[in-house]
Image (tube, rainbow, N blue to C red):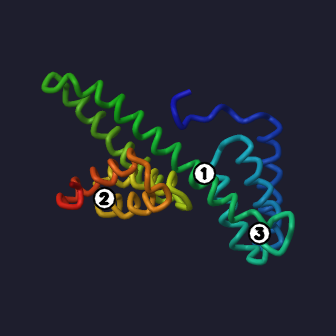
């Protein structure tokens, strides 16, 4: 599998997802909050993180008192962890695709119009991966702030990347690699004195 790809779901998981979906259709809204939560757990088990995130968000929306229930009290923590894992997988996939795209652009002027169009479409798809990553990151530590910063660099959001790298450095102030990343973000944001 390429980075970010998922293996096919098991038949048991597909059946469970179908049953929870039917339960939600029969009782939309608050009565079905447990079905959203349970379906999210199946998606999480299958490493299909985006629908797990959507279901946990919907669960929290329709059951705002979830933290008072022992079975559901960790929903927000799960949402943060799953969001950060998913965002990191998107960044990894985006960086992989950039490397793969660089092989095709080595041809330079020898590319046909069709190849140029395909490369442009792929470039847009890569940018979409980074946009989604920025959307799903919920930074809580150095790793997640740095991940979102790297996604922002790929989107040319240099000011956002600087802000995220600064937050990451607060968590791990002695990480030389992270400080170098912050310096690079400053440089790309044309803040050369701070980069130095």
Q: Which of marks 3 and 2 is in front?
A: 2
Residues marked 3 and 2 touching at CB (< 8 Å): no
Give the distance between the C-alpha atoms of the residues marked 1 and 2, in whole angstroms.
24 Å
Residue 72 position (above or below residue 15) = below
Residue where numbered disc 2 is placed: 157
Q: Nearer the viewer, residue 105 or 183?
A: 183
SS type, badge 3: loop
Q: Quadrant of residue 140?
A: bottom right
Residue 173 position (above or below residue 120) = below
Q: Nearer the viewer, residue 138 or 177?
A: 177
- Upstream in sequence: badge 3 or badge 2: 3
Residue at x 57%, y 48% (from the top left corner): 86
Q: Which of marks 3 and 1 is in front?
A: 1
- Upstream in sequence: badge 3 or badge 1: 3
Horizontal side of residue 158 vs 71, given as left or right: left
Q: Which mark is residue 50?
A: 1
Q: Looking at this rendering, what residue extends furthest in the bottom direction?
A: 65
Horizontal side of residue 191 vs 77, given as left or right: left
- Upstream in sequence: badge 1 or badge 2: 1
Horizontal side of residue 65 vs 196, given as left or right: right
- Other-residue count near label 1 (Cα within 10 Å), few / some / many at <14 / 14–19 / ≥20: some
- Other-residue count near label 2 (Cα within 10 Å), few / some / many at <14 / 14–19 / ≥20: some
SS type, badge 2: loop
Residue where numbered disc 3 is placed: 28
Give the distance between the C-alpha atoms of the residues marked 3 and 1, in whole angstroms.
20 Å
Q: Nearer the viewer, mark 1 or mark 2?
A: 2
Q: Quadrant of the N terminus?
A: top right
Q: Looking at this rendering, what residue extends furthest in the right direction?
A: 70
């Amino acid at each position: 599998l390429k980075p970010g790809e998922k293996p096919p779901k098991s038949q048991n998981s597909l059946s469970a997802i179908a049953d929870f979906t039917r339960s939600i259709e029969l009782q939309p809204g608050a009565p079905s909050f447990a079905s959203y939560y349970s379906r999210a757990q199946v998606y999480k088990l299958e490493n299909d993180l985006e629908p797990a995130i959507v279901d946990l968000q919907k669960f929290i929306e329709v059951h705002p008192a979830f933290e008072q229930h022992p079975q559901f009290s960790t929903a927000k923590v799960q949402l943060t962890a799953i969001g950060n894992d998913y965002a990191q997988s998107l960044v990894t996939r985006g960086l992989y695709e950039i490397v793969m795209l660089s092989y095709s652009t080595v041809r330079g002027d020898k590319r046909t119009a069709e190849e140029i169009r395909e490369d442009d479409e792929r470039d847009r798809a890569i940018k979409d991966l980074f946009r989604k990553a920025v959307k799903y990151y919920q930074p809580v530590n150095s790793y997640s702030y740095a991940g979102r910063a790297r996604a922002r660099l790929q989107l040319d959001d240099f000011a956002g990347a600087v802000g995220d790298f600064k937050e990451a450095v607060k968590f791990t102030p002695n990480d030389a690699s992270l400080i170098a990343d912050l310096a690079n973000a400053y440089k790309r944001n044309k803040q050369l004195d701070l980069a130095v």
